[in-house]
Amino acid sequence: MTYAANPKFAVGQPVSRTEDPKLVRGAGRFTDDINLPTQLYAVFARSPHAHGVIRGIDIAAARAMPGVLGVFIGTDIEAGGFGRMPCGLTAPNRDGSAMVKPSRVALAVDKVRFVGDPVAVVVAETAAQARDAAEAVVLDLDPLQAVTTAESAMAANAPRIHDEAIGNVFLDYHYGDTAKVAAAFAQAAHVTQLDLCSNRIAVSPMEPRCAAGQYDDGQWTLHVGCQGPFATRNTLAREILKAAPDKVRVITGNVGGSFGMKAPLYPEYVAVLFAARALGRPVKWANDRSESFLSDGHGRDHQMHAELALDRDGNFLAVRITGTGNLGAYPGQATVIPASANVVKNIIGVYRTPLLEVSTKCVFTNTAPVGAYRGAGRPEANYYMERLVDQAAREMGIDRVELRRRNHIPADLMPYGTPSGQTYDSGEFTAVLDKALLFADWNGFEDRKRESERRGLLRGRGIGQYLEVTAPPASEMCSIRFETGGNITLTTGTLDQGQGHATPFAQVAAQRLGVPFERIALRQGDSDDLKAGGGTGGSKSMVSAGKAIVEACDKVVAQGRQIAAFVLNASEGEITFNDGRFAVEGQADRNLGIGDLLEVIGGGLPLPAHLPQSLDVEHIAQTPPSTFPNGCHIAEVEIDPATGVVRVDRYSMVNDFGVMINPLLVEGQAQGGVVQGLGQALMELVIYDESGQLLTGSYTDYAMPRAEDMPELRFASHPVPATTNPLGAKGCGEAGCAGALPSIMNAAVDALSKYGIMHMDMPATAPRVWQAIREKAPAL
Amino acid sequence: MPNVSLTVNGKAVSRDVDTRTLLVQFLRENLGLTGTHIGCDTTQCGACTVHVDGKALKSCTVLALQVEGKTVRTIEGLADGEKLHPMQEAFREHHGLQCGFCTPGMIMSAVDLLNRHKSPSEETIRHELEGNLCRCTGYANIVKAVQAAASAPRG
Amino acid sequence: MGDYVRPAGLDEALEHLARRPYAVVAGATDLYPAHVGRSLQGHLLDISGILTLRGIVRHDDHWRIGATTTWSDLIAADLPPLFDGLKQAAREIGGRQIQNAGTLGGNICNASPAADGVPPLLALDAEVELASVDGMVRLPLAAFVNRSRSTARKRGQLLTGILVPQPALPCRSAFAKLGARRYLVISIASVAAMIEIDCGLVSRARVAVGACSPVPCRLPELEAALRGAVLDKRLGDCVTESHLAALAPIDDIRADASYRRAAVTVMVRRILNQLGPA
């Protein structure tokens, strides 16, 4: 047996994924595929009203239904000693005061605050029985007026959703030097302004949320799809169950997509654990898709006034973003970051912009809580800037390519300190733009436009040059265990939700240790394995887990060197390590591979007590700083002016993801980001009516891209290695969205500029586009 | 409870079922074939696609009792033992899946597609996959995988 | 839920129907979506086992499409250009899996304002055949689908077939649909047209529109205006918004009424221009 790394699995190779043989057979283990012995089924009774005071919840009829073993409401959970739903995040208001943090009981006790707010959990022998009984729960409400938009929630006469939140403001956020920014605008030769909306999105991973709770003699177990079992376990233990962490275990199998949505702790998870303890049997709950539309965290929903100040030559002087984020009904599950800090970090993108100011009010409304969605503020900020740039170019009569080049942060200014406090380590923004123009055949556009016009269609092209600031540092772990027989188990605190961690992580470890890729398996998703773990989110896993893996591999080598020195009868300082082999320096024939060492150790050779007794390591790494993936996406759209139908005809992207450990998977991530961006730009919109009823409650009314809606997605790279992490990698998970929103919308506006249309809001649906054309050209 | 007898992945099965049991519930809960997934409740997503008498159907829209006497093939019945079906192989090779949740339904639809179109154009493939939603891939590599499977040697 | 019965013969089915109310299902593609978040209730009569209700047969002066003929059956059938529009509609209904299960009869009986099968059948001047223990009756399709989500089917009656007259003259037909997305999302508007041709002129035209009125309906003013028109690629240019007087489009989250009216006008023009050239 050779026990060595095969170069075809080296870092940089497009290795197909090791988990796929299982998944393509339908042998994945998603949460709903797990059935625990004696398990019961939970169904939630949810509020049909958006806002109201609870007078009573009558569960008697439901309790008496066939098969029903328990019906629990919020007061039961409070009486049972459970803590309230936490809101971990804290940011100061602009006046320095702390943001309010209204508490939430998992099942509403005093008021209901959105349609879908759970008020009772019904547990029965079968799911059908639980469903029947949930329909029999009677909620007695004094209805209150509902508010569904940030604007209406802040109005003087608006009903207050949480007593603590005056004017329904959750966070009054501010960043920047107001006076300096105002001065820059006052001096500007030109100011471009746009009102920009980031439309509300139903995140909709294809696997609905699901959870199964278990309680056994003081030991809690939750099976759930999340983004990191370590943090989920800690929050559950500390905030909800008031139990020692070792009494709580969170287990996650395959996760059928998340995109930020499954990251927080949801009330349903608390309720199934409560019910499991109360009834002494495991309790499973699986969301129906209709319930998902109501109860999953939504994404986006920001309304911003965006302003860019330029001098006479088109140099950017300052950017100012002022607006609101609709956070929905509850903190905790909602997050303020997309509408606040991530706008600050990402707004200047690739452009020298010395000053910035961001003021946002994050506001409670009677809608589903709004959490993270792919990019969580990063794509939005890039969208704001790239729309401003195109608009400024048009207004000032400067070519949009030239205006971008003129303002790029030049590569020779790296590392570059931004006004948001970031330090860009690397990036060649002009080169990326130039490469994208060639790749997209920018100059061939006029011919294609004539061809479109011949068919009665408008054609437009748009640039979306983005830069994202990926998630900030945290701690992350990697353990490496050498199993009997030569298999190697890597364990990380990151958590795959479809990204494909197992393959690139193994590529890194195989190369570092010189061991066979095929022998390496990745273990994730069990909090009992973890001493640390930031989970997966914010496009950071390859960078954070990557550094942990690299350092853990170094520790393996260090331990191996000590053992090899003993076995080879040399001093530790004489031992070299190359390509998986330990050798005595200058005596190449005195060497041992990692495989040999494992055989020696496994064979029972007694090792002196002062030496490591195995090669196994468990390592916690301080993860490296944020990376700055960037790129330039170019979209071309065709618009039928008679019907308003918009179709993306060509889509080309050049991205800088630094060193791509596995380019096949990186390309897949970029494509996935683009499709979600295209959906937001052209189709997707969550609509509530004024009373807070959800009008887009199924895939019939909520349009998500299908195969026919997508153009070919052409992918090219301009990799500039990151200098701040050992792999040189940059995050790639969310970037597609950041390039897609502006490139597609700039292209749509470009096509419509024929009619003097200067802006379209997302989503640019056929009726909206038609309406915009009619307003400018009624005779058409 | 009424009884239903049918052939699933080549094996005769017979079970007593509640009248309102959908085929997808029957497969997942009564037979433990959890590769067929439930992604929606309005017959839109296609994650539950199986073949009934050789044709693709959404198993969330059929009552178990309606398939009495019929032949059902699920994702678990596609591979030949250890050897993946060419479509499964193509999805694996071309990174046609990410989270893998829509994948069983997508593959069952794609196999049905190739049963009817020997060398489909990209346009045909995209049109034919209209009944299946994927939130992860952007469909680019799914289309690539189906094209690859279409040109792979059959047999 | 109540009982489930799956008779093998029509007579048995009609006897069941005479005895008590049933929800009739064949492909059952609308059954599950219609019960989102609720349990299925009531008794079910599954007519998919009645073999005589499925298939398309040519008679002397008409065609008979069995009620449980699926959209896939229709797409696969060898049919003349008369049915091109109906086939185009079939290909745009719900995706392949739904086309394999969903039936023409079910699409009609659901009576959705946006049912894609109904406009092309109206353009074909179809009749429906209703059976009960008391015998068989026929009704024009327009009289059968008479209100949104409601039909003229009486208790005890079963829709058994759709009858399409065979025109004496050569004819062409077409269908087009506009949705937030083309397929699974319910139509913003759908249009079907059929023209009979005599010496290069339109001798008869039927044009029907879905999703722009409580039930899909024909456009008699336009049909009259088209009579005698020259068949060429400008056939649709004569269409004006006044020809669409029969429509009563509504505002909903997919589109507002003014958009629907304008889009339908464009679609009708285009479909006629497409039918025009030789």
Image (tube, coloured by chain):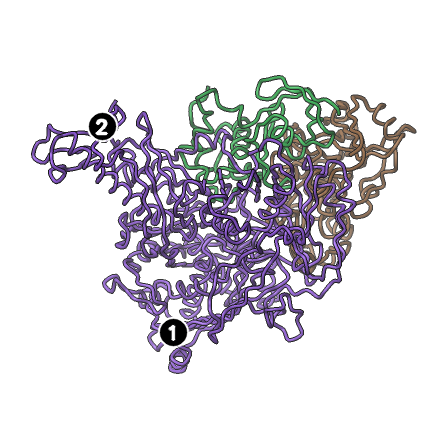
Chain colours: A purple, B green, C brown
Q: Is residue A126 visible?
A: yes
Closer to the camera, C167 or C201?
C167
Q: Residue furthest left?
A: A586
Report x, y in % for residue A549.
Answer: 31, 43
Report x, y in % for residue A404.
Answer: 35, 65
Question: Residue A29's mark?
Answer: none
Which amino acid is tagged 1?
A: Ala
C157 vs A418: above or below: above
Crowdedness near tag 1: few (<14), some (14–19) or many (≥20) residues, C-alpha within 10 Å = many
Report x, y in % for residue A385.
Answer: 42, 65
**Residue at image location 12% in from the left, 31% down from the top:** A569
Q: Quadrant of residue A114?
A: bottom right
Provide the residue designation for mark 2: A606
| Image quadrant containing the N terminus of chain A | top left
Provide the residue designation for mark 1: A318
Q: Secondary structure at mark 1?
A: strand
Chain of residue at mark 1 = A
